[in-house]
């Protein structure tokens, strides 16, 4: 028995959305539709920015080098530092003096909207087995402008086999 051939059906042409209109794949901006591709690129830039900032500020403990990644205002939610560049710079200097051998390993980097989240393993810091750290940064206009953190000492023994990271 021969199979019947299907007729090709022409699909209607899709109109490009008007400037400022909502795209099927994303939101809208003053420059026009936000595509999934442009949103992914923006999130990738934000991740790169935050990783560079973190490397300078915490990895190298060099607040002067980190300053270029910060906005004119820097809101601090961590209990360990004050607002602004001077507040986080003072923290970095004190941290360097108390833990000169401290280093970190990035375990996860997550970006959504204007936030970038780092999940880190702090080593040679406050706790003998290290710390599990979650740092959250808000990015605005290509600069780091706000910070939250959660720091948990890693215990010698865990009650499950899953590992901290």
Image (cartoon, rainbow, N blue to C red):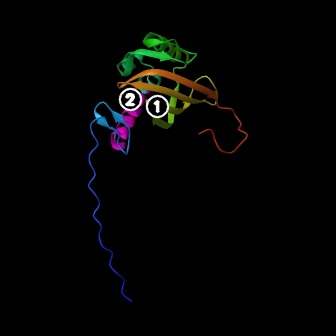
Q: Label 2 near label 1: C-beta < 8 Å?
A: yes
Q: Quadrant of residue 78?
A: top right
Q: Residues within 10 Å of mark 1 (few under 14, many from 20)?
A: many
- Helix, strand or loop under label 2: helix
How far across and down, in percent of the image, does residue 143 sit?
Answer: 37, 23
Q: How many marks?
A: 2
**Residue highlighted by disc 1:** 116
User: Which corner quadrant holds the N terminus?
Assistant: bottom left
The answer to whether residue 161 is magenta is no
Q: Does residue 103 appear left or right of residue 70 in this picture? A: right
How far across and down, in percent of the image, does residue 6 sit?
Answer: 33, 75
**Residue highlighted by disc 2:** 49
Front residue of this view, candidates 31 and 86: 31
Residue at left offset 47%, top offset 21%: 146
Front residue of this view, candidates 143 and 3: 3
Q: Quadrant of residue 149?
A: top right
């Amino acid at each position: 028995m021969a199979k019947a051939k299907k007729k090709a059906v022409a699909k209607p042409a899709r109109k490009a959305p008007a400037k400022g209109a909502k795209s099927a794949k994303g939101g809208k901006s003053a420059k026009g539709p936000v595509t999934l591709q442009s949103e992914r690129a923006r999130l990738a830039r934000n991740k790169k920015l935050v990783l560079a900032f973190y490397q300078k500020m915490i990895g190298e403990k060099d607040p002067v080098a980190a300053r270029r990644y910060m906005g004119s205002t820097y809101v601090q939610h961590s209990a360990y530092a004050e607002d602004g560049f001077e507040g986080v710079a003072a923290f970095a200097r004190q941290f360097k003096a108390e833990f000169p051998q401290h280093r970190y390993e990035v375990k996860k980097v997550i970006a959504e909207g204007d936030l970038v989240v780092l999940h880190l393993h702090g080593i040679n810091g406050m706790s003998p087995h290290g710390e599990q750290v979650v740092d959250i940064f808000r990015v605005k206009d290509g600069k780091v402008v706000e910070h939250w953190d959660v720091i948990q000492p890693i215990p010698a023994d865990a009650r499950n086999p899953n590992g901290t990271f």
